[in-house]
Amino acid sequence: MTDILKNFAKVNLCHQPTPLEEMPRLTEALSGPRLFVKRDDCTGLASGGNKTRKLEFLIADALSVGADTLVTYGAVQSNHVRQTAAAACKIGLNCHVILERRVLHKGQRYEETSNILLNHMFGTTIEFREAGLDITAEALALTNSLKFQGKHPYLIPGGGSNKIGSLGYVSCAQELLLQIKNQRLNVQSVIVATGSFGTQAGLTAGFSALGCDIPIIGISVRRKREEQIENVYKLSLETSQLLGTKPIKRNQVLVYDNYIGEGYAIPNKGTMDAIEILAKKEGILLDPVYTGKAMAGLIDLINTDAINANGDVVFIHTGGSVALFAYEDELRQKIL
Ligand SMILES: *Cc1c(COP(=O)(O)O)cnc(C)c1O
């Protein structure tokens, strides 16, 4: 296979290829199709996760324009912010972040533990904002104020989700296809959590560029189906333009929105059940914000026969288990 990314600059942050592993005990418990997991929770940087692949391309772009400071933003327990903070340390850049209090009623500890604790360890400069503000505008204002101070800031959008960041998931698509071929799998669908769209957009653009028509099914963790489809579609179109390959069609973008529960970063029973079964059957840690919901979706799609036993299924594990410790109360209730 020729490398469709060979003309794009990237820095090295990531353990790759990440393993593609079978989950035989989960398969047996669900009596569904053979289930596999793509371990992008094992990308290696500071507990890993999907943002690291995106940062390889984003930081290469930042360096190419002479940046000395990364600026980014996210929810309080953002995994993207933690991975950006760690990447900044590894490359030797400063890092300023804005955290949005998007999740209400979580108490003081939520702003001190897990990803936040690690952000402090990486020496990141952190500012908090209340929910409801235009967080992108806040980040732009911060970027401009750093410029006035004589710094060279580079603004990375939330979740690292623009066409440059999406290249990280084109690279994952490429890697995954090779593994599917080498392991002789017959894959009927790929399941992934979808939030700021870059992961699903990159995978969709990547598969399309490689002539692979295996459907990528996004499980939304925040937005309604129509809105999420539109967002993923637009970004995958931009990504395929950047790659110089043929445009994505809207009907290539598949999203379910019925596993969100009460809202972003609020786990429900399905989320907690999914976290528990993956721990008990496979020794795999999911997270309460993204992968727990995506796995709840996969389990339900199998139970309702929307996904049948004809063909293997790949679940992309996008990371996030660091945030488990910010949800100790919910976990204790579930498992003790
Ligand atoms: C950010 C994130 C996602 C969602 O990826 P997007 O590219 O934002 O859609 C999924 N899982 C985890 C653990 C994440 O941190």
Image (cartoon, rainbow, N blue to C red):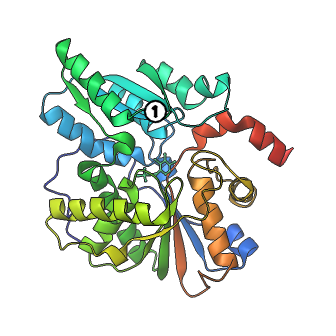
Mark 1 is surrounded, within 10 Å at the Cα level, by few (under 14), some (14 to 19) or many (20 or more) other residues, namely many
> Is 218 placed above or below 143 here?
below
In front: 15, or 198?
Answer: 198
> Which percent across, then down, holds residue 151?
19, 17
Seen at 67% across and 32% down, the residue is: 105
Seen at 18% across and 74% down, the residue is: 246
Seen at 49% across and 39% down, the residue is: 79
> Which percent across, then down, holds residue 26?
69, 68
In front: 5, or 192?
Answer: 192
**Camera sees residue 69:** no
**Camera sees residue 12:** yes
- Looking at the image, the residue that sits furthest to the bottom is 310
Q: Hey, which quadrant is residue 307 in on the image?
A: bottom right
> Which percent across, then down, holds residue 303?
70, 77
The answer to whether residue 32 is left or right of residue 18 is: right
- Looking at the image, the residue that sits furthest to the right is 336
Query: Can you identify the residue that label 1 sits on?
Result: 82
Mark 1 residue CB less than 8 A from any atom of ligand 1: no
Callout 1: helix, strand or loop?
Answer: helix
Look at the image and tell me in which quarter the C terminus lies: top right
Q: Hey, which quadrant is residue 13 in on the image?
A: top left
Q: Which amino acid lies under the numbered mark 1 shown in the image of this protein?
A: Arg
The number of numbered badges drawn on the structure is: 1
In front: 97, or 188?
Answer: 97
> Is 165 placed above or below 82 here?
below
- Looking at the image, the residue that sits furthest to the top is 149
Look at the image and tell me in which quarter the N terminus lies: bottom left
> Which percent across, then down, holds residue 318?
49, 52
> Is 171 placed above or below 209 here?
above
